[in-house]
Image (cartoon, rainbow, N blue to C red):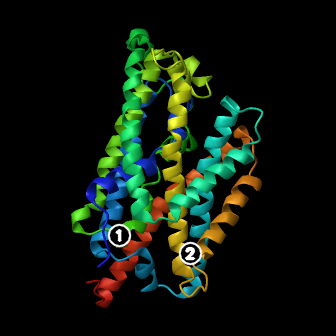
């Protein structure tokens, strides 16, 4: 009998999938796209993510834990599902590499300006592939260890309370900007990643409480985002937030601890642990899809060869400057939101059709 992921690990793993380096520029994006008291918009985005997770929970409940591959294969022909999952595998593989690439480009722009990003990128991808080769259970164990190392980071924000001023919030809500749908999508992309729970169905059971864990993780992510954004909006003015590249790093640079001189560098470098787990989970989702597409492959390394190709494509085919990479991440974020919404709808439709045909997933 295959071992199953425990509830605690799935919760922490879900939190790591959702969060990454996005938090460092989240206050700026809120100031640019939402306006005054933009931190409150996170509650709206969190509610949408929670509703989407409820939709996924219906797939898990009605499908009785069957994998998404078995569900789609039961109703759709191969000439539809094979190209679809090929595209999905490539999408997840490139997206995971883009997350790592974004972190590397930020690192080189802040601390290693004379070092070509390709060297750090290769080291990061090596760590990703080493962890990926250990399987989902080792990945979840690593996420738990990293979680305890990173939990205390948010406590450092309380050092900013001396310069925190509620008057900077203003009594106005969502003013002084032009609201656009794309702007809201940009904020909502900070919550994405939860759709990977669709791939975890075969690795959990009733004791794992998969969907409950992802809902709790969404609440943890929301609370951390609101804490960081609320303090940022009270520490800086709206105009300042709109002109800072990474407001959270600027906020941390004001803090001085007796044992650490550059708190911002320390926190940013520790976030590498989150980036690795996020990158690995998207690579794992891509590898799982590739294994299903090529079950009779002679070489077990086939998924890794494909992922290496996708990692190379994500670095060289997409511009290697931070300013040009961020629009690509935004485009992939929109595509990811579409996958998160429409894939569960398609699966639920298939399950409904199968139910009417009398198929049982027991």
Tell me which numbered mark, 1 or 2, is placed earlier along the sequence: 1
Quarter of image, res 89: bottom right
Q: Is residue 326 left or right of residue 348?
A: right
Q: Which residue is label 1 attached to?
A: 203
Q: Which residue is label 2 attached to?
A: 290
Q: Which residue is rendered at x = 33% and y = 41% of the image?
A: 220
Q: Nearer the viewer, residue 31 or 126?
A: 126
Q: Of the numbered discs in the image, which one, if any, rests on residue 332? A: none
Direction left: furthest residue: 207
Q: Nearer the viewer, residue 322 or 190?
A: 322
- Give above or below for 302 relative to 126: below
Q: Secondary structure at mark 1?
A: helix
Q: Residues within 10 Å of mark 1 (few under 14, many from 20)?
A: some
Quadrant containing the N terminus in the rendered view: bottom left
- Give above or below for 301 relative to 253: below
Q: Nearer the viewer, residue 118 or 58?
A: 118
- Give above or below for 307 relative to 176: below
Q: Residues within 10 Å of mark 2 (few under 14, many from 20)?
A: many
Q: Is residue 24 visible?
A: yes
Residue 97, given in percent of the width and then of the height, sits at 62, 54
Q: Which residue is rendered at x = 59% and y = 72% of the image?
A: 303
Q: Which residue is rendered at x = 41% and y = 35% of the image?
A: 225
Residue 194, given in percent of the width and then of the height, sits at 42, 55
Q: Nearer the viewer, residue 356 or 23?
A: 23
The alpha-carbon separation of the residues under discs 1 and 2 comes to 17 Å
Q: Secondary structure at mark 2?
A: helix
Residue 26, given in percent of the width and then of the height, sits at 51, 34
Residue 349, given in percent of the width and then of the height, sits at 39, 75
Q: Which residue is rendered at x = 50% and y = 65% of the image?
A: 285
Q: Is residue 75 visible?
A: no
Quadrant containing the C terminus in the rendered view: bottom left
- Give above or below for 26 relative to 13: above
């Amino acid at each position: 009998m295959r071992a199953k992921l425990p509830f605690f690990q799935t919760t922490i793993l879900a939190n790591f999938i959702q969060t990454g380096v996005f938090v460092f520029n989240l206050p700026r994006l809120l100031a640019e796209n939402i306006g005054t008291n933009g931190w409150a918009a996170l509650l709206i985005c969190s509610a949408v993510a929670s509703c989407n997770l409820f939709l996924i929970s219906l797939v898990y409940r009605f499908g009785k834990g069957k994998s998404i591959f078995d569900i789609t294969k039961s109703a759709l022909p191969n000439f539809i599902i094979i190209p679809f999952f090929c595209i999905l595998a490539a999408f997840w593989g490139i997206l995971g590499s883009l997350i790592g690439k974004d972190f590397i480009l930020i690192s080189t722009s802040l601390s290693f300006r004379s070092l070509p990003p390709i060297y750090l990128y290769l080291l990061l991808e090596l760590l990703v592939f080493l962890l990926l080769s250990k399987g989902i259970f080792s990945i979840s164990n690593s996420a738990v260890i990293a979680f305890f190392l990173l939990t205390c980071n948010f406590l450092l924000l309380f050092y900013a309370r001396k310069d925190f001023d509620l008057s900077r919030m203003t009594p106005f809500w969502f003013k002084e900007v032009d609201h656009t749908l794309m702007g809201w999508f940009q904020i909502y992309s900070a919550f994405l990643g939860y759709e990977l729970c669709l791939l975890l169905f075969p690795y959990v059971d009733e004791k794992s409480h998969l969907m409950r864990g992802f809902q709790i993780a969404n609440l943890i992510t929301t609370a951390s985002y609101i804490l960081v954004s609320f303090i940022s909006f009270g520490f800086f003015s709206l105009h300042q937030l709109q002109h800072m590249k990474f407001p959270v790093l600027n906020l941390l640079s004001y803090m001085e601890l007796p044992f650490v001189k550059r708190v911002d560098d320390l926190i940013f470098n520790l976030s590498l642990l989150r980036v690795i787990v996020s990158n690995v989970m998207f690579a794992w989702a891509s590898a799982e899809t590739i294994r299903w597409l090529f079950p009779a492959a002679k070489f077990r390394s086939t998924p890794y060869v494909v992922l290496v190709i996708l990692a190379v494509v994500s670095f060289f085919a997409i511009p290697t400057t931070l300013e040009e990479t961020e629009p690509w991440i935004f485009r992939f974020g929109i595509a990811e939101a579409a996958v998160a919404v429409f894939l569960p709808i398609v699966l639920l439709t298939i399950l409904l059709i199968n139910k009417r045909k009398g198929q049982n997933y027991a």
